[in-house]
Image: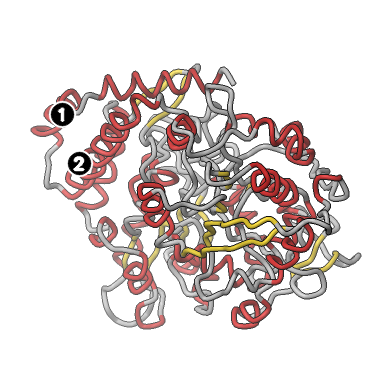
Amino acid sequence: MKKTMIWGLSILLLAGTVLAGCSTNNAGSNNNAGSTNNPSASADANKSPVALKAFMIGDPELDMNANKFTQEMNEKLNVKLNIQINSNETAKEKRQLALTSGDYPDIFLLNWSDVITPSELMKLGSQGVLLPLNELIDKYGPNIKKRMEEIPNYKSITAPDGNIYGLPAINECYHCSFGSKMWVNTEWLKKVGMEMPKTTEDFKKMLVAFKETDLNGNGKKDEIPLSGAVGNPVASVLMNAFINDDSGTHCNNAPCYFISKDGKAEFTANKPEFKAGLEYIASLYAEGLIDPGAFSQNGPAYKQVVNRDGIATTGVAIGLHPYVFFDPNNPIHLQYEAIPPLKGPSGVQTTGYGGGKNLGGANFAISNKANKEQQIAAIKLADYLVTDEGTIRATHGEKGVNWTEGTASDLDLNGKPAKYKPIVLPLGETRKHNNAWSEVGPFVKTKDFRASWAADQDIKAKAGYELRLFKATQLYDGFQPKESFPGNMFIDPAAVEEYTMLLTNINKYVDENKVKFITGNKKFASDWDAYIEGFNKLKLDRYLEITQKAMDSTKKK
């Protein structure tokens, strides 16, 4: 899913639908944390408010200092928040510039678009830029401690030196965890008299039928059997029928092309199974079954291809969900259903999975700019945000305005009585209320919490979209690897720069060569051996050595 797409949905559906926030972790919780009457959360009215300068990611069109929730926090915690708001697109660059210049705030309140990675936590923590939170949590964070007891993977944010330099957001987006999905036009399937494909062979026969038939009825041979985009890669989905491939879910500046077996990191992009997968995809391309633009076009261009002339043009589209490649108001998206993971010629049938046991980084941190009083105020803020009450208020808005309690007739994603019910507002009205922070900071939304919101049980209705995604994801659940590659690893600070360079170069090398082999610019018979040899020059062995050391360190926590 493209970042701008996620942010737009996050605002539009702020009232309670849970499309936004594609952070993917998979711990369970009974969501009982919610003690908001503890002494640490009460303000001392006799003291002057504690000033807190905050770097926050959010909607740049909103004045977050005038935001109603901000004002409530000021009063509740006796603080005076001074929020610098940054867009998803610019946040990472601005945060890095602030840290480099030394002009950074007291606290960071971040979202999915820019978390503080484990490597950064270690580096900034060892430099004293980010403060260890252990003692503050112990004294002033009863709800944080409760969450740590309830949610096992909270401990993965603890650095190897035993310190906690930042707090994560727990946002167990079920459908986001299975990011590599293919969606097929079922009307086209009916017209060619075929059933949902089960194997790679079935899939190829279906694409051929799509290419050879005037399925959109416009008298032209303009049907595109299969399309995708740079951020919605064709190769990663299909590769899962040959060897597990997670490059479609987290390959942005993160370890890619890895699987874990018995706690050992194995690289996949140099294995025979990977070659077999590329050969299959290349055969599709050679027969004109894959849109040539799928390997270079961005999100907007992808939508133009799929939505061309207001008619169905594409048989199979790659994406986290149909709104990735269709406008929500275009009814053609209702024709598309998810294709379950395909079985390859060797019986392999897996799916990319981003819902591993560990968290991706920190959404909240306190810097050394904060004095003791500010540190206490900051951890009290975090302690409130991790409660159910704090999470709902901060991310969904006000009761009676943005959400309400479920009624007897409201059902949740599991078909059970809903605990909460969203009140969906137009984007303009949501902005007018300016009463929530959206999904920033250390909020906690477990899988059970997210599923407890009322959902329209008609998956074809716009309000039933989340249920549609929930049910589509169930087709993939069970095909993920039994052993997940860690979602976060603390790299030895002394090796961070080296590791970053190795990771960047190797990812780029694989990504570029994949496209060359698929499109025929490189030949398997004459160029594959040289491709494999190239990993020696890129120091793959050293890359694996650092990765394994980080994995071993992660397991010890």
Residue for point 19% across, 28% down: 538
Residue that label 2 marks? 513
Which secondary structure, mark 2?
A: helix
Farthest left residue in view: 526
Residue depth check, mark 2 versus mark 1: number of the one nearer the observer: 1
User: Is 79 above or below relative to 28?
Assistant: below
Residue that label 1 marks? 534
Residue 85 lies, in percent from the top left, at 51, 65
User: Is 291 above or below relative to 105?
Assistant: below
Which secondary structure, mark 1?
A: helix
Residue 108 lies, in percent from the top left, at 54, 51
Residue 167 lies, in percent from the top left, at 61, 41
User: Is 436 above or below relative to 250?
Assistant: below
For badge 2, the amino acid type reads Asn
Residue 325 lies, in percent from the top left, at 43, 67
Residues under numbered marks 2 and 1 in contact, where contact means CB atoms less than 8 Å apart: yes
Residue for point 44% across, 23% down: 550
Disc 2 crowd rating (10 Å Cα; few below 14, some 14-19, many 20+) is some
Relative side of 474 to 78, left or right: left
